[in-house]
Amino acid sequence: DQQVKQNSPSLSVQEGRISILNCDYTNSMFDYFLWYKKYPAEGPTFLISISSIKDKNEDGRFTVFLNKSAKHLSLHIVPSQPGDSAVYFCAASMNFGNEKLTFGTGTRLTIIP
Amino acid sequence: ETGVTQSPTHLIKTRGQQVTLRCSSQSGHNTVSWYQQALGQGPQFIFQYYREEENGRGNFPPRFSGLQFPNYSSELNVNALELDDSALYLCASSRFLNSPLHFGNGTRLTVT
């Protein structure tokens, strides 16, 4: 039972354009959502998070949007840079904490120079 | 400030054997979590320790066990290894229970 889904296994975007990564969840008890980025042979690196009391959170080039009614969140990267090429994981948890993160299967983002 | 370090980086074991993976948390962090990442999948939560006590467990059998030590380093032990245990095992630490996790680079376990 996949409670967090990333339906696009891969995405290619031109350098300088916007990258939009999507994530859907089924468990309405999730109230805290995170995006992690992973390079080969490295562990995931925290990017940005959002709690269910907000619908948007920004940090530099990264913005996460949360649509609770649709159980959908998205990560926008503007402008996209070659160093953004990595696998991006969406994760969710309950009780606004980091116990028991449920991860999606990831989206491989490739930035084309 | 040192990050999360895991050892060994790679390990090959035979089915039925036991394995111990080690993790050194980031300085000042008192929670540690372990995740299993199978090929092509996202990380799956195994368990979390907070101040040396288990603070939550995922859907893994009892042959997966752990410890957190007073210096907040941690071990993951897996008994009676099965072929499906082949995966990348990730350790993560955080300063507080509601802080983002900082992951190590993982231990790649292969069971033959």
Image: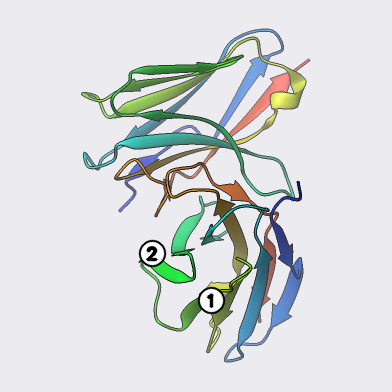
**Vertical position of residue A106 compared to residue B32: above or below:** above
Q: Position of residue A31 (x, y in %)?
A: 29, 36
The mark that comes first in sequence, 2 or 1, is 2
Q: Which residue is mark 2?
A: B55
> Residue at left 51%, top 76%?
B66
Q: Name the residue tied to disc 1.
A: B67
Question: Same chain, marks 2 and 1?
Answer: yes
The residue that appears at 24% across and 24% down in the rendered structure is A70
* Relative image position of residue B105 (x, y in whole percent): 70, 54
Q: Residue at x 38, y 45 (%)?
A: A97
B17 over A45 or under it: above or below: below
**Quadrant of residue A72 in the image?**
top left
Q: Residues within 10 Å of mark 2 (few under 14, many from 20)?
A: some
Q: Chain of mark 1?
A: B
**Image side of residue B37 versus residue A56, left or right:** right
Q: Quadrant of residue A60?
A: top right
Chain bearing tag 2 is: B
Task: Report the amino acid beneath label 2.
Answer: Asn
Where residue B56 appears, x then y in whole percent? 36, 64
Please say if A14 is above or below B89: above
Query: Marks 2 and 1, how far apart in space?
Result: 12 Å
* x 70%, y 28%: residue: A85
Q: Nearer the viewer, residue B42 or B3?
A: B3
Please name the colour scheme applied to the rendered image. Answer: rainbow
Query: Dot 1, crowdedness within 10 Å: few (<14), some or many (≥20)?
Result: some
User: Which quadrant would the C terminus of chain B be assigned to in this image?
Assistant: bottom right
A95 vs A101, left or right, is left
Q: Look at the numbered disc 1 and give the secondary structure of its residue.
A: strand
- The residue type indicated by label 1 comes to Leu
Image height of A58 relative to B86, above or below: above
